[in-house]
């Protein structure tokens, strides 16, 4: 992204940020949901700045926000990576968690575990640092959000939002590995 595009985005955020956040907050259930939608809008803005001219910025922002809110209510959102680690109805008896946490020295299980953990590490490296850190602290190190918030000075709702984005990314990236391991 060019420096002028970055400056343009900064000015748009400072000019429309509070109004847009209020608009979104009135249409969603929680502050965390509003923060998620707002982040989605800013992300789409950064992607659009380099690819398409935006003539009516205000109209564009509020249209994108409306669409993001509508999309949010249309699809079920995953709560955590736990959803990926539980068996579905088609694979009863093939519990993914059992494979990953198996401590036996079965070579096949060790290979599958190694493939999964390597894929997880690769996917974690792709995340922005803030999302990666909150996911690792909360999911892998089992640190409560409240404690993370106290240590980092970041509001709990922001941490929850960051973890949600991390989980969405990881679910997408690890789905193929999950399918391969379960079907093995």
Image: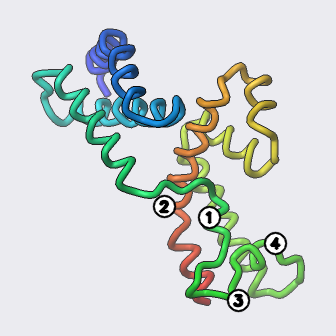
* Secondary structure beneath label 4: helix
Kindly report the distance in space between the C-alpha atoms of the residues bearing marks 3 and 4: 15 Å
Q: Which residue is mark 1?
A: 83
Residue with the mark numbered 2: 172
Report how far apart the C-alphas of labels 2 and 4 lie in the structure. Answer: 21 Å
Mark 1 falls on what kind of element? helix
Which residue is painted at 27% across and 36% down in the image?
66
For the residues bearing labels 1 and 4, Cβ distance under 8 angstroms: no
- Find residue 173 and report its horizontal and vertical position in percent: 51, 61
Q: Return the disc, 2 or 1, that comes first in the chain's sequence.
A: 1
170 vs 133, left or right, is left
- Measured from the top left, where is residue 26 in percent x and y? 39, 27
The CA span between labels 3 and 1 is 16 Å
Q: Which residue is mark 3?
A: 93
Find the distance from the CA under tag 2 to the CA under tag 3: 23 Å
Residue for badge 4 = 101
- Farthest residue toward the right? 104
**Which residue is at the front of the view, 10 or 115?**
10
Earlier along the polypeptide chain: callout 3 or callout 4? 3
Mark 3 or mark 1: whose residue is earlier in sequence: 1
The numbered mark, 2 or 3, whose residue comes first in the sequence reads 3
**SS of the residue at dot 3?**
loop
Q: Is residue 50 positioned above or below 9 on the image?
A: below
* Discs 2/1, front: 1
């Amino acid at each position: 992204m060019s420096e002028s595009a970055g400056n343009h985005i900064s000015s748009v955020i400072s000019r429309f940020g509070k109004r847009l956040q209020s608009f979104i907050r009135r249409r969603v259930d929680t502050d965390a949901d509003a923060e998620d939608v707002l982040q989605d809008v800013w992300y789409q803005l950064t992607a659009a700045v380099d690819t398409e001219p935006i003539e009516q910025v205000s109209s564009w922002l509020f249209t994108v926000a409306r669409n993001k809110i509508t999309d949010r209510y249309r699809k079920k959102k995953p709560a955590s990576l736990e959803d990926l680690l539980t068996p579905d109805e088609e694979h009863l008896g093939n519990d993914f968690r059992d494979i990953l946490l198996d401590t036996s020295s079965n070579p096949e299980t060790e290979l599958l575990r190694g493939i999964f953990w390597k894929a997880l590490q690769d996917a974690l490296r792709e995340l922005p640092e803030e999302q990666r850190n909150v996911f690792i602290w909360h999911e892998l190190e089992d640190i409560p959000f409240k404690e993370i918030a106290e240590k980092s000075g970041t509001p709990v709702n922001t941490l929850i939002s960051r973890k949600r984005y991390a989980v969405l990314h990881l679910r997408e990236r690890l789905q193929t590995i999950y399918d391969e391991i379960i079907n093995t």
